Image: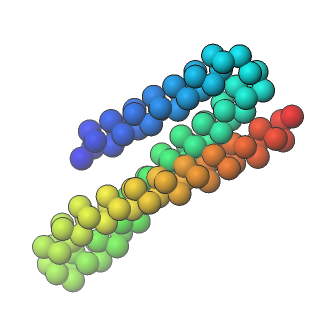
């Protein structure tokens, strides 16, 4: 599971880097500058949101595990931690991209 998280972070970083590289290679300096802000925010928000979502899923499952003497908690941890990571990551990415755009506009 831990390896999958690192692979996901690596793929996300690569995707962000490629988007910046593609945009900046076109030659539009303003678009290049903007995408650097938005992609950095999106990547940071994705990672932070994913970590927060995984943590929240784990907390919920800990309570379920106590009530079911561990059996329900294990199944719950696999399902809810994954769902929490996905939803938190997507929400964090959207929020991070928005913050990156706000920062870009403030720097103009």
Q: Where is residue 81 in the image (x, y as percent from the top left)?
A: 32, 61
Closest to the observer, 6 or 27: 27
The image quadrant where one finds the C terminus is: top right
Taking the image as shown, residue 67 lies to the left or right of residue 95, namely left
- Colour scheme of the picture: rainbow
Is residue 78 something one can see in this rendering?
yes
**Quadrant housing residue 23:** top right
Residue 52 % position (x, y): 46, 58
Q: Which residue lies furthest to the front in this view?
A: 26
Q: Is residue 21 above or below residue 41?
A: above
**In terms of image quadrants, where is residue 26?**
top right
Q: Is residue 62 left or right of residue 40?
A: left
Q: Which residue is drawn at 84% across and 41% down?
A: 106
Residue 74 placement, left or right of 26 = left
Regarding residue 58, the answer to whether it shows in the image is: no
Residue 42 position, x and y percent, is 58, 43
Residue 91 appears left or right of 30: left
Residue that extends furthest to the right in the rendered view of this protein: 108
Residue 73, quarter of the rendered image: bottom left
- Measured from the top left, where is residue 85 in percent x and y? 39, 56
Residue 4 lies, with reference to residue 34, above or below; the image says below
Q: Total label count? A: 0
The answer to whether 80 is drawn above or below residue 50 in the figure is: below
Q: Residue at x 54, y 53 (%)?
A: 92
* Residue under the point 28% across and 71% down: 62
Residue at 62% over, 42% down: 41
């Amino acid at each position: 599971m831990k390896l999958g998280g690192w692979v996901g972070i690596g793929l996300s970083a690569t995707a962000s880097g490629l988007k910046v590289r593609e945009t900046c290679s076109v030659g539009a300096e303003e678009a290049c500058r903007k995408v650097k802000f938005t992609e950095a925010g999106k990547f940071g928000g994705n990672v932070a949101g994913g970590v927060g979502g995984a943590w929240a899923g784990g907390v919920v499952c800990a309570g379920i595990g106590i009530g079911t003497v561990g059996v329900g908690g294990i199944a719950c941890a696999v399902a809810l931690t994954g769902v929490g990571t996905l939803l938190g990551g997507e929400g964090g990415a959207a929020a991070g991209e928005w913050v990156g755009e706000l920062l870009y506009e403030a720097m103009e």
